[in-house]
Image (spheres, helix red, strand yellow):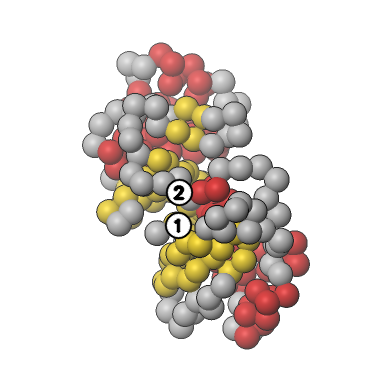
């Protein structure tokens, strides 16, 4: 089974997309709405990701579920009390579910892209933290994923990744997993959340805890 990671606090999973789009579509062969929506996606890779997210969500919930989208593009489960966040990257899909509040997850493959673009999403203090770790490329990706996860949890548009989201505790980056705090300054409440991360040989994953 391509479910390669499953955890319960919070409920989340990672799916390795080994199947073709047709093989994934077989799981939904009796559901015309799913088949019609999937076949409308022209890209084979995007279709695989779209189907894998739904297969993973069903596996985590232990039942068939429907995913719809809000006007801002955020996914929702209309027939469940769980809040959902989804992400995918080359060959992998990730889902996190929360019973209490909006949540976020982000998965990325290893690359130098986040490090090259670090000045576009990290403020001066965050850049100093990155520099203190020798400008580690994976840590740059962790920071990007963390802010992307938090952005999804906020569920609103017009968020400036530098001005409105701030990493306020330095992660323990001695290991390949850990947690740190991130806060936002775009709402009156100034929500502070803990973000967890894991670094595997294949991908980097962050989620709201």
- Lateral position of residue 49 relative to residue 15, left or right: right
Of helix, strand and loop, which one carries label 2? loop
- Residue depicted at x 48% and y 50%: 104
Q: Nearer the viewer, mark 2 or mark 1?
A: 2
- Residue depicted at x 61% and y 34%: 72
- Lateral position of residue 135 relative to residue 9, left or right: right
Q: Circle 2 is placed at which residue position?
A: 103
Q: Circle 1 is placed at which residue position?
A: 207
Question: Which of the two residues, 22 or 104, is positioned nearer the viewer here?
Answer: 104
Quick check: marks 2 and 1 in contact, CB under 8 Å? yes
Rounded to the nearest whole Å, what is the CA distance between mark 2 and mark 1? 8 Å
Residue 194 visible, this orientation: yes
Residue 23 visible, this orientation: no
Residue that protrudes farthest toward the front in the picture: 188
Quadrant the N terminus occupies:
top left
Q: How many marks?
A: 2
Mark 2 neighbour class, 10 Å CA radius: few under 14, some 14 to 19, many 20 or more: many
Indicate the position of residue 20 as horizontal and vertical percent values. 44, 35
Indicate the position of residue 78 as horizontal and vertical percent values. 39, 27
Indicate the position of residue 134 as horizontal and vertical percent values. 63, 84
Question: Which of the two residues, 146 or 115, is positioned nearer the viewer here?
Answer: 146
Of helix, strand and loop, which one carries label 1? strand
Question: Which of the two residues, 33 or 2, is positioned nearer the viewer here?
Answer: 33
Q: Of marks 2 and 1, which one's residue comes earlier in the chain?
A: 2
Residue that protrudes farthest toward the top in the picture: 32
- Residue depicted at x 70% and y 45%: 158
- Lateral position of residue 69 relative to residue 137, left or right: left
In the figure, 133 relative to 10: above or below?
below
Indicate the position of residue 182 as horizontal and vertical percent values. 54, 65
- Residue depicted at x 47% and y 80%: 172
């Amino acid at each position: 089974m391509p479910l390669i990671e499953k955890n319960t606090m919070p409920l989340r999973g990672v799916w390795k997309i080994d199947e073709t789009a047709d093989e994934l579509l077989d799981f939904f062969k009796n559901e015309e709405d799913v088949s019609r929506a999937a076949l409308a996606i022209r890209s084979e890779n995007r279709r695989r990701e779209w189907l894998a997210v739904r297969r993973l969500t069903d596996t985590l919930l232990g039942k068939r579920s429907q995913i719809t989208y809000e006007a801002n593009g955020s996914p929702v489960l209309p027939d469940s009390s769980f809040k959902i966040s989804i992400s995918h990257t080359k060959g992998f899909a990730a889902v996190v579910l929360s019973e209490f509040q909006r949540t976020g997850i982000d998965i990325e493959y290893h690359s130098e892209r986040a490090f090259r673009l670090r000045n576009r999403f990290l403020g001066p203090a965050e850049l100093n933290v990155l520099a203190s770790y020798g400008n580690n490329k994976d840590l740059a990706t962790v920071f990007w994923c963390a802010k992307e996860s938090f952005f999804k949890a906020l569920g609103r548009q017009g968020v400036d990744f530098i001005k409105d989201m701030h990493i306020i505790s330095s992660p323990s980056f001695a290991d390949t997993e850990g947690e740190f705090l991130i806060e936002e300054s775009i709402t009156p409440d100034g929500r502070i959340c803990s973000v967890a991360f894991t670094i595997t040989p294949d991908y980097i994953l962050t989620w709201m805890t």
